[in-house]
Image (cartoon, coloured by chain):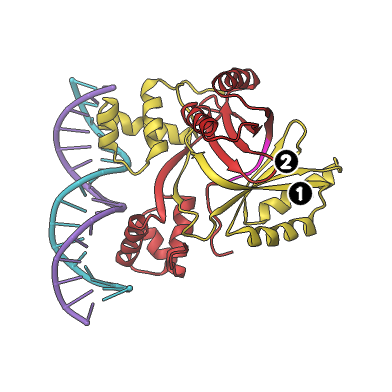
Chain colours: A yellow, B red, C purple, D cyan
Amino acid sequence: MMADLDKYDQQILKILQDDCSVSIDEIAEHVHLSRNACWRRIKQLENTGVIRKRVALLDADALDRGQMVFVLIKTNQHDADWMTKFDQTVRHLPEVVGAYRLTGDLDYVLTVRVADVAAYDRFYKKLIARVPVSEISASFVMEHMKDTTAIPIGT
Amino acid sequence: MMADLDKYDQQILKILQDDCSVSIDEIAEHVHLSRNACWRRIKQLENTGVIRKRVALLDADALDRGQMVFVLIKTNQHDADWMTKFDQTVRHLPEVVGAYRLTGDLDYVLTVRVADVAAYDRFYKKLIARVPVSEISASFVMEHMKDTTAIPIGT
DNA sequence: GGTGAAAGACATCCCAC
DNA sequence: GTGGGATGTCTTTCACC
């Protein structure tokens, strides 16, 4: 799976996943390549899908979504129908920003963004109205110690 | 906490958190404002911190970090010293991309990005060598059903 | 890989409303 | 707050070493 990325590519990626608003000239200066060489590499990284997209990260508090919640879920219905329903439900509920199927004791974990505990309760009622789950527990985030979209490179 | 963002600001933010490489002209066209009005609004959203940063999202597989792991942690040492040590440990371990202190039965959850199960084991050994935890369990992500950095707006 | 040059797109800022 | 227009910077694409 690992594309063959040399140290120049890795350096470029490190910069861009921290701040993609820097100009190509600045990148070229940091990695000690010409502007053109940098540009060509970035284009290729985009075309090969190593760079998936460029997005703005917003302040959740400013948008009244300051409360992040981890929702741990177990099911007793391990059939394809239930899975499809669950899948569609979490995709459509806007509060859900992450949904993962897991190994181990847990079956699923959701990451949910809401304004406050009351808003979570409304979300919870919506969720269980649409798909039955045998066990569900919410853990509210009290402190974000670390939270990055940057993937560790070369460590 | 909620900044007073009108529908124009909200539309602009929706576009940028999905793709920040679009030009201001395109945004202006979509929200039916002049290029200038859009530009001023974006600058203000940046200055007030509603737009925190702009980043490139990379393909974890291409960087050999395709395995995401949720690490659920409980401690029996609820003192400030332990907390400081734990905090510093997760901040310095590059595999950790998210670390959250929670309410409820769990104390902490980490999101970790590694190449595979063997790499997780190496991480696990590093972690417990640096800070004692009374209970720790790893759940490996089998399927990413949803995974977005976009914060739900106006829903 | 590098240079330079040229075209156009783009962000930026001043002005008037 | 809005839009129009001038300006300079940047990206993008050449051809070529």
Q: Nearer the viewer, residue A73 or B34?
A: A73
Question: Quarter of the image holding residue A121?
Answer: bottom right
Could you tell me which secondary element the residue under label 1 belongs to?
A: helix
Q: Which amino acid does the dot numbered 2 rest on?
A: Tyr
Q: In front here: B135 or A126?
A: B135
Q: Could you tell me residue B153's position as x and y percent? A: 53, 61
Q: Position of residue A4 (x, y in %)?
A: 47, 20
Q: Look at 65% across and 62% down and name the residue there.
A: A118
Identify the residue shown where x is 52% and y is 61%: A64
Q: Considering depth in this image, is A143 or A124 the residue closer to the camera?
A: A143
Q: Position of residue B124 (x, y in %)?
A: 61, 21
- Tell me if I can see residue A77 in this picture: yes
Name the chain letter of the residue that bears numbered label 2: A
Kindly identify the residue that appears in the image at 40 percent across and 60 percent down. B27
Quadrant in the rendering for residue B78? top right
Of helix, strand and loop, which mostly describes the magenta segment?
strand
Label 2 residue SS = strand
Label 2 crowd (10 A; few <14 / some 14-19 / many >=20): many
Q: Is residue B144 magenta?
A: yes
Residue A108, numbered label: 2
Label 1, label 2: how far apart the Cα atoms are: 10 Å
Q: Which label was assigned to residue B126?
A: none
Q: Are marks 1 and 2 in contact (CB under 8 Å)?
A: yes
Q: Residues within 10 Å of mark 1 (few under 14, many from 20)?
A: some
User: In the rendered structure, which segment of residues is drawn in magenta?
Assistant: B143-147
- Give the camera-side residue of A10 and B26: A10
Question: If the image is split into quadrants, where does the C terminus of chain B sit?
Answer: bottom right
